[in-house]
Image (tube, coloured by chain):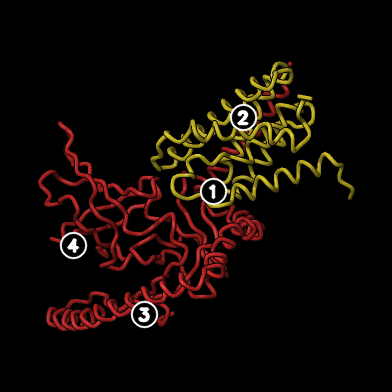
């Protein structure tokens, strides 16, 4: 089976994101640890909405459930909603300059972390919300690196 | 124009919700979880490489003077602990005699198995660890886990060669404790913060003071009695509240310890023998 170069880049990007996600963070740094897998998916959908759809987001979300060890379907739901929002706005986001794409990734990461906290709290735990902005900011700061790595950057 | 996309989002969202409900209420998706865990083991190993390199360099690149200093310090510590152990042995024997007189059946001797952390939860919402001992080493669901300072948590999933442990600071975890000074009982709940436990439903008249040492009480039969859990770091009585807000600083180094102990209580031994 021959995989196209684009598929291989996506595979490598998700592989590296998974490794980074699993690297332990100590002493409060875990509150600043971005959701690498979600960031990769959102960067792909923001830049290439014609190639990466909501089904792709849902499947990667299911994979993320395995990585995070969360209830099966939790990240699938979050990735589906985030991917869906970006796709619904893709007529505009596709033409956004870097700063606005940065804002989109920040807002989507913030929404994802909030939705995840709500879902965890609905399952009987009590999680504070104070780590959300830091985590979302770190996710958004990954944008240039992720775009460069996956070759989807539109800045020359 | 959005209708096919919206329909697809809706279908996938409903599918995800259905999966969550099924996973929460049945064990049908356990094979998915097991499969994901086995697939992710090599990735877990790779993600642990930076920490392993640091440990290796700490061990092998230390200079001779530092090793000599460590050796001297450890020898002194060993001497001190051996001295304390002699006293402990005497106290344990005396305690056993008293318990026999009272016909009590308190657990006194627990055996332990050394284990190493091979992975931690990648998300701040869940406080879990993966350790390198599984069912082939005798590990079982609910088994207590300690570090050198105190109680860490319990095993929640056991695989053949590794296990996942839920830490006492996880927000879904609760643990029966007692105050060392006077035996007042309470429940220590996780707060999703590695440095904080909360005592729930403590009456304002309860005799708990700042700095009190908390131990596992053994109630519920899950954790053996007498292991350090934490120290009371804050007590607050909000006006109009029926209970006090008490915060506890955990004894165990929950986000730092890499070498841990799995505790086999005599209850376990009896159960294994009877099986």
Q: CA distance from mark 1 to mark 2?
A: 20 Å
Q: Of callouts 3 and 1, which one flags the residue occurring earlier in the amino acid sequence?
A: 1
Instruction: Check the image and name the residue furthest to the right.
Output: A2
Q: Are marks 1 and 2 on the same chain?
A: no
Q: Is residue A72 visible?
A: yes
Tag on residue B157?
none
Badge 3, how many Cα within 10 Å: few under 14, some, many 20+? few
Write down the residue under mark 1: B122
- Which type of secondary structure does the marked residue at label 1 adopt? loop
Q: Chain of mark 4?
A: B
Residue at screen point 42% across, 70% down? B262
Residue at screen point 53% across, 43% down? B21
Q: Of callouts 1 and 4, which one flags the residue occurring earlier in the amino acid sequence?
A: 1
Verify CB contact (< 8 Å) between mark 4 and mark 2. no
Q: Is residue A5 left or right of residue A92?
A: right
Residue at screen point 33% across, 63% down? B150
Q: Position of residue B263 (x, y in %)?
A: 39, 71
Q: Chain of mark 1?
A: B
Write down the residue under mark 3: B270
Badge 1, how many Cα within 10 Å: few under 14, some, many 20+? many
Badge nearest the viewer, 1 or 2: 1
Residue at screen point 34% across, 62% down? B151
């Amino acid at each position: 089976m021959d995989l196209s170069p684009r598929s291989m880049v996506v595979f490598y990007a998700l592989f590296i994101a998974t490794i980074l996600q699993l690297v332990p963070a100590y002493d409060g740094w875990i509150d600043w640890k971005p959701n690498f897998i979600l960031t990769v998916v959102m960067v792909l959908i923001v830049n290439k909405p014609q190639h990466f759809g909501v089904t792709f987001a849902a499947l990667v979300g299911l994979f993320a459930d395995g990585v995070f060890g969360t209830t099966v379907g939790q990240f699938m739901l979050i990735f589906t909603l985030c991917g869906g929002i970006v796709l619904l706005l893709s007529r505009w986001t596709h033409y956004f300059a870097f700063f606005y794409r940065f804002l989109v990734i920040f807002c989507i990461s913030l929404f994802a972390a909030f939705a995840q906290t709500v879902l965890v709290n609905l399952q009987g735990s009590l999680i504070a919300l104070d780590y959300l902005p830091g985590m979302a900011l770190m996710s958004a700061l990954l944008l240039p690196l992720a775009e460069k790595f996956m070759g989807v950057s539109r800045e020359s | 124009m959005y209708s096919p996309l919206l329909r697809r989002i809706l279908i996938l969202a409903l599918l995800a919700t259905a999966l969550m409900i099924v996973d929460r209420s049945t064990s049908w998706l356990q094979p998915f979880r097991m499969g994901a865990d086995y697939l992710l083991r090599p990735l877990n190993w790779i993600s642990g490489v930076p920490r392993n390199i640091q440990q290796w360099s700490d061990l092998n690149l230390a200079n001779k003077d530092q090793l000599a200093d460590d050796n001297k310090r450890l020898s002194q510590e060993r001497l001190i602990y051996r001295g304390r152990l002699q006293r402990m042995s005497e106290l344990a024997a005396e305690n056993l005699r008293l318990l026999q007189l009272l016909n009590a059946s308190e657990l006194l001797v627990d055996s332990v198995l050394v284990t190493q952390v091979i992975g931690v939860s990648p998300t701040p919402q869940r406080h879990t660890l993966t350790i390198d001992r599984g069912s082939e080493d005798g590990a079982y669901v609910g088994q207590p886990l300690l570090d050198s300072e105190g109680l860490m948590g319990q095993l929640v999933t056991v695989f053949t060669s590794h296990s996942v442990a839920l830490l006492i600071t996880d927000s879904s975890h609760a643990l029966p404790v007692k105050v060392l000074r006077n035996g007042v009982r309470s429940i220590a709940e996780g707060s999703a913060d590695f440095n904080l436990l909360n005592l729930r439903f403590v009456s304002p008249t309860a005799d708990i003071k700042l700095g009190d040492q908390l131990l596992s009480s053994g109630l519920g039969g899950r954790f053996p009695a007498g292991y350090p859990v934490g120290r009371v770091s804050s007590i607050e009585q909000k006006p109009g509240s029926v209970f006090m807000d008490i915060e506890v600083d955990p004894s165990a180094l929950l986000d730092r310890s890499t070498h841990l102990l799995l505790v086999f209580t005599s209850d376990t031994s009896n159960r294994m023998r009877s099986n």
